[in-house]
Image: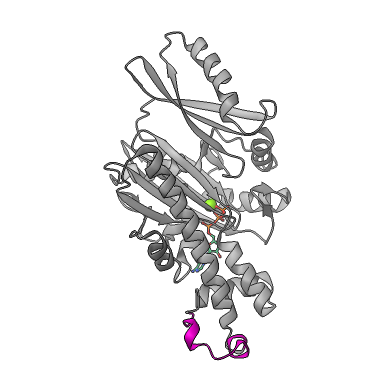
Amino acid sequence: MTVIDIGTDSIKAGRFKKRGKSIFIEGLSIKSLPYQTIREGRIVDEAVVSNRLSEIVNELKCRGDRIITTIPNNNLVIRNMELPEMDDKARLAEAIKWESEDHLPFPDEGSVQDFKILSREDGKVQILLVATKRDMIDNILGVFERISLTPSVINIQPMALISLADYQNNIENIVAIIDIGTSGTRVIIGDRQNIYLSRNIDIGGNDFTKIIMDEEKLNYIDAENVKKKNGIPEVLEEDDIESIAQMAATGMGQGHYMTALARNLAEQIGRSLDYYNMKYRNKIDRIFITGGGSRLEGLKEIIERGIERDLSTLDPFINIGYKKNISLKGEEFAVTVGLAVSEVLPDEG
Ligand SMILES: Nc1ncnc2c1ncn2[C@@H]1O[C@H](COP(=O)(O)OP(=O)(O)OP(=O)(O)O)[C@@H](O)[C@H]1O
Ligand SMILES: [Mg+2]
């Protein structure tokens, strides 16, 4: 099987083989996309994306494979609901449809819904409802269609990330996973059965790059390079700053803006965690971070300080076989590997 994650900054793909309940990586590929090829989760330049896709397919030699892909988190809604037990499948589906109207922020027409039965206990059915806009799906399928490929599965990224943690036996009780991408950050809280919260925060790697573009008057590519090289520059405490002129001369203004943005991100992550704690009165055991944006030097520490919790990195290449010559970039590939393991984990529903 081949998994393809079309991200804002790059397309990530992997070719996998099932070996019983584990998976083996046959090949990986990552192809970067030009700035603003994808905006707010929407593929604006379909030709560019399908060209890159075609390169990936040739490289991985995966044309005949079962293809698994994912939709962006923009306009994705995930809700838990509880319904009384019904034996009749069609009646249950109908009930879910009615209930979902109260849970969804956009109208029924133009939306695509799916649900997963999480558990049935004490005359109650726990359901995970997933919905997105139809045009988001058409947008993704469109780029595959251009190269005559039809994905067999479209899965959601929060599910892929939770599956990855589960596959690695990292879920004892409740975990949170923070995916810092280009366009935004996703906070997912779940356990082995359920996703309790999935939130999008619209601060991502891009926003740090934009500060450098503005402050140093650089183009996107150069600003990206500066960001990856310098990370978040250390800022002096206010007492140590002699003048604004000195701040500007040393490029410290940039450090201040980046630090402020990182603190803002930490605060919003903290709010999601607090919301979960309040609603479910449950403790989150471990918090993982992933996504290319989490490699920004200094960011992890700022988040840790902000939320007063330690963060672990979610290494997708644990418990997985791969050829020695594959070069691995863990943060970028968590969703890709997660989508692959979702296909081998037993379906609880
Ligand atoms: N060493 C690094 N230091 C700082 N930032 C980095 C580093 N490496 C990658 N990034 C940033 O990570 C982001 C890309 O991460 P990732 O591939 O997870 O995003 P994506 O999947 O393309 O985006 P999205 O999920 O938002 O659609 C970019 O903003 C990039 O600048
Ligand atoms: Mg991503």
The number of callouts visible is 0
Q: Position of residue 132 (x, y in %)?
A: 61, 35
Residue at (33, 49) in percent of width and height: 320
Determine if the magenta segment contains residue 238: yes
Residue at (51, 77) in percent of width and height: 229
Determine if the magenta segment contains residue 15: no
Residue at (45, 71) in percent of width and height: 297
Q: Quadrant of residue 122?
A: top left
Who is closer to the viewer here, 240 or 76? 240
The quarter in which the C terminus is drawn is top left
In the image, farthest residue toward the top: 88
Residue at (40, 20) in percent of width and height: 125
Colouring chosen for the image of the structure: one colour
Q: Is residue 257 above or below residue 47?
A: below
* Residue range highlighted in magenta: 235-248
Q: Is residue 34 above or below residue 200?
A: below
Q: Can residue 58 be seen in the rendering of this structure?
A: yes
